[in-house]
Amino acid sequence: MAFRKPEFNAKKRRLERALTIHDLREIAKRRTPKAAFDYTDGSADSEISLTRARQAFEDIQFTPSILRDVSHVDTRREVLGGTTALPFGIAPTGFTRMMQTEGEIAGAAAAGAAGIPFALSTMGTSSIEDVQQANRNGRNWFQLYMWKDRDRSMALVDRAAKAGYDTLLVTVDVPVAGARLRDTRNGMTIPPTLTPRTVLNALPRPAWWIDFLTTEPLAFASLDRWSGTVAELLDTMFDPTVDFDDLAWIKQQWPGRLVVKGVQNLDDARRLADLGVDAILLSNHGGRQLDRAPIPFHLLPEVVREVGRDTEVHLDTGIMSGADIVAAIALGARFTLVGRAYLYGLMAGGREGVDRAIEILRSQIIRTMRLLGVATLDELTPGHVTQLVRLAPRAALQEERQLQEEA
Ligand SMILES: Cc1cc2nc3c(=O)[nH]c(=O)nc-3n(C[C@H](O)[C@H](O)[C@H](O)COP(=O)(O)O)c2cc1C
């Protein structure tokens, strides 16, 4: 018998106790003011899109193979012309330094250390160049929102190209802002304002406030200072006229790989594949835009079948564990992105918290692969995963029943 050496570093102790992304979420919730936590954790309207997307990952059945040599597991993947150490990257998120002041710099540095790509949002709170410095030897991707001011949008794209970003993600599911009701109810503004309610909420979270008030003030990477609500900001900036011709034009301007983020039906996927984009990212923006949107994980098999031969199909929304990522890869996704899973880590412990989130996902991926009897990601097949039916369109079910009767 041996005594376990006590861990005197409180942050380390806290993070080591987190065994899942859900655990990190609980720590994040305790440590972060309500408005910032809810901005991250919440989604649009009744939050049905996000609940369903997470549920869809829970509603799977894995089918393992036995008696395979899984002593060594290789989690590497070729994605958009480069190798990544794990089959996921960090999704672009806005206002990240408002959640925890280390923000994008922590995310980019942790991604670099883990050998996975980091995506910086147009609404990011660290500059294109600072993020590149934080992840000098790794892959940085830039996410573009097309603004009403086209010249300013394209100036950002030029800066990203000059700084060596290799991939542009064009987000297409925000013609207008979704209705984030938690933000409205919390009176969430950018930057956070001190009201009697925020002060009361701050009392049990002094560390967050001391950190926030003693580090560099919140500023946007790519736009001037703003004071107002998030929805007001989005609706002032975004251009609801953006269409397929604009996308083709952006494609001509950008020298690297191009991903379209926010694809939600088969017809659009086909049209984008015809346009020659490098990847389609099936996503409903983590449920933050249209509520009751299609579940990306349910769309995956048919989109892969239709366009997957020539176009990479990526997926995000709802990923809370490494097993979710393995399931997506088995059903044909080339790559996945995680948004909140990373942000819960960030809010739970800054850079070390992001490292912990990546480590949790990594160990879950490896363990799931071993238990499935596969040693490489390419060995994963749709036969390893059954999507159990809880929610399926009536028409699809009827069709299936008819086919069974005819057989
Ligand atoms: C707090 C937050 C801010 C986000 N900001 C952006 C953004 O600025 N641009 C963008 O394209 N997507 C943004 N997203 C969506 C993410 O890129 C990603 O699609 C989503 O988080 C995936 O779902 P998940 O959080 O369940 O992993 C944001 C998501 C969150 C949670």
Image (cartoon, rainbow, N blue to C red):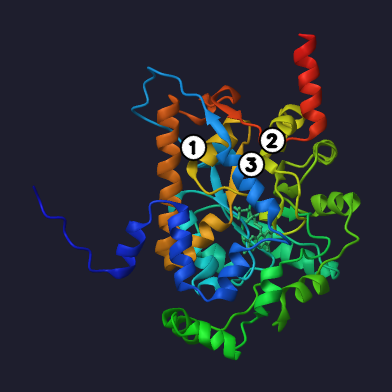
Q: Which of marks 1 and 2 is nearer the N terminus?
A: 1
In the displayed structure, would residue 267 be above or below residue 371? below
Q: Which of marks 3 and 2 is nearer the N terminus?
A: 3
Kind of residue at disc 1: Arg
Which residue bears the numbered disc 3? Answer: 80
Which residue bears the numbered disc 1? Answer: 76
In the displayed structure, would residue 328 be above or below residue 123? above
Kind of residue at disc 2: Leu
Q: Distance between the residues labelled 3 and 1?
A: 13 Å
Which residue bears the numbered disc 2? Answer: 300
Horizontal and vertical percent position of residue 103: 53, 69
Kind of residue at disc 3: Leu
Q: Quadrant of residue 99?
A: bottom right
The answer to whether residue 234 is left or right of residue 182 is: right
- Which of the pair 354/64 is nearer the observer? 64
Foreground: disc 1 or disc 2: 2
- Say which mark, if any, is on residue 289: none
Q: Distance between the residues labelled 1 and 2?
A: 21 Å
Q: Is mark 2 on a helix, strand or loop?
A: helix
The verdict on label 3 being within 8 Å of ligand 1 is no
- Residue lying at 49% horizontally and 55% vertically, measured from the top left: 111
Horizontal and vertical percent position of residue 284: 72, 51
The quadrant of the image that shows the C terminus is: top right
